[in-house]
Image (cartoon, rainbow, N blue to C red):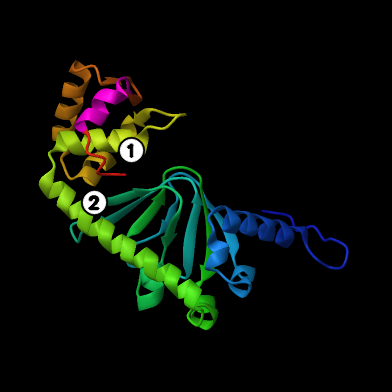
């Protein structure tokens, strides 16, 4: 539990630190152009650890969340109990925008796959103070429009490109960065779901990539060995 220390004048340190963090992320992602001072005053910081559910499909969502740190996966569960990965997200992302506008329950389950930090603001506050602000409404409109476009693009990708291209593009544009060029093997099932194939088929692709010297498989990771070859196969479809 976080202790609440009192400052001179009756102002508590926890509140001051929360406001400093909120202001830092507001500036970092340029949200000051869209979120007015009144809305900002209601924002809090929420932290989720790896494996923790951020929201659950079918449950009421009380806040609109702004992902500012960490990675998370979004998946939907069928009536038979099967999970389908919809997306893996890194900052910046907004969650609960559609649910807030339509006043519906959460459409997908969202799980942290690393430590995730969110700016949170309640739907009630947004209904009272945000829907009258054209700049904030423009932000929501842009986000919803982008999600619609990405959904259409994802459907086209799974129809138009073979699994080799999808997996190569996933490795180069999502997994690989300057600090970490590896995919944890525990994520392979999620990766297969995300790119629209079976785990068995993905394993065949991995074996072929290993034989071509593009990747290496260890006990824990799939390590990228030749990114240039992967780029030659990929179509940048997950950028």
Q: Residue 210 appears in which quarter of the rendering?
A: top left
At which x and y percent is residue 198?
A: 15, 39
Q: In which quarter of the image is the C terminus?
A: top left
Name the residue located 58 percent from the left edge and 64 percent from the top edge.
Answer: 32
At which x and y percent is residue 64?
A: 47, 67
Name the residue located 24 percent from the left edge and 33 percent from the top edge.
Answer: 168
**Disc 1 target residue:** 173
The answer to whether any part of residue 61 appears in the image is: no
* Residue 84 numbered tag: 2
At which x and y percent is residue 3?
A: 73, 55
Q: Is 95 drawn above or below residue 90 in the view shown?
A: below
The answer to whether any part of residue 182 appears in the image is: yes
Q: What stretch is highlighted in magenta?
A: 224-233
Element at label 1: helix
Horizontal side of residue 3 vs 60, given as left or right: right
Calculate the distance from the C-alpha at mark 2 to the C-alpha at mark 1. Answer: 21 Å
Name the residue located 11 percent from the left edge and 49 percent from the top edge.
Answer: 159
Element at label 2: strand
Q: Residue 75 appears in which quarter of the rendering?
A: bottom left
* Residue 213 numbered tag: none
Asked if marks 2 and 1 touch (Cβ < 8 Å), the reply is no
CA neighbours of label 1 inside 10 A, class few (<14), some (14 to 19), many (20+): some
Horizontal side of residue 37 vs 219, given as left or right: right
């Amino acid at each position: 539990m976080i202790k609440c220390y009192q400052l001179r004048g009756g102002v508590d340190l926890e509140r001051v630190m929360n406001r400093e963090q909120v202001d830092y992320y507001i500036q970092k992602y340029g949200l000051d152009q869209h979120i007015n001072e009144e809305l900002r005053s209601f924002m809090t910081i929420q932290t989720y650890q790896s494996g923790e559910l951020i929201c659950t499909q079918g449950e009421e969502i009380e806040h609109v969340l702004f992902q500012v740190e960490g990675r998370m996966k979004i998946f939907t569960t069928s009536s038979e109990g099967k999970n389908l990965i919809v997306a893996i997200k890194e900052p910046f992302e907004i969650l609960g925008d559609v649910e807030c506008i339509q006043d519906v329950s959460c459409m997908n389950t969202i799980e942290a796959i690393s430590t995730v930090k969110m700016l949170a603001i309640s739907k009630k506050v947004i209904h009272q103070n945000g829907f009258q602000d054209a700049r904030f409404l423009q932000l929501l409109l842009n986000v919803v429009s982008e999600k619609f476009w990405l959904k259409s693009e994802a459907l086209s990708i799974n129809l138009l490109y073979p699994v080799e291209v999808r997996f190569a593009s996933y490795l180069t544009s999502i997994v690989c960065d300057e600090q970490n060029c590896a995919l944890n093997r525990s994520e392979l099932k999620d990766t297969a779901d995300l790119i629209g194939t079976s785990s068995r088929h993905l394993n065949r692709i991995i074996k072929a990539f290993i034989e071509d010297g593009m990747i290496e498989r260890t006990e824990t990771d799939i390590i990228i060995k030749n990114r240039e070859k992967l780029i030659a196969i990929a179509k940048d479809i997950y950028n």
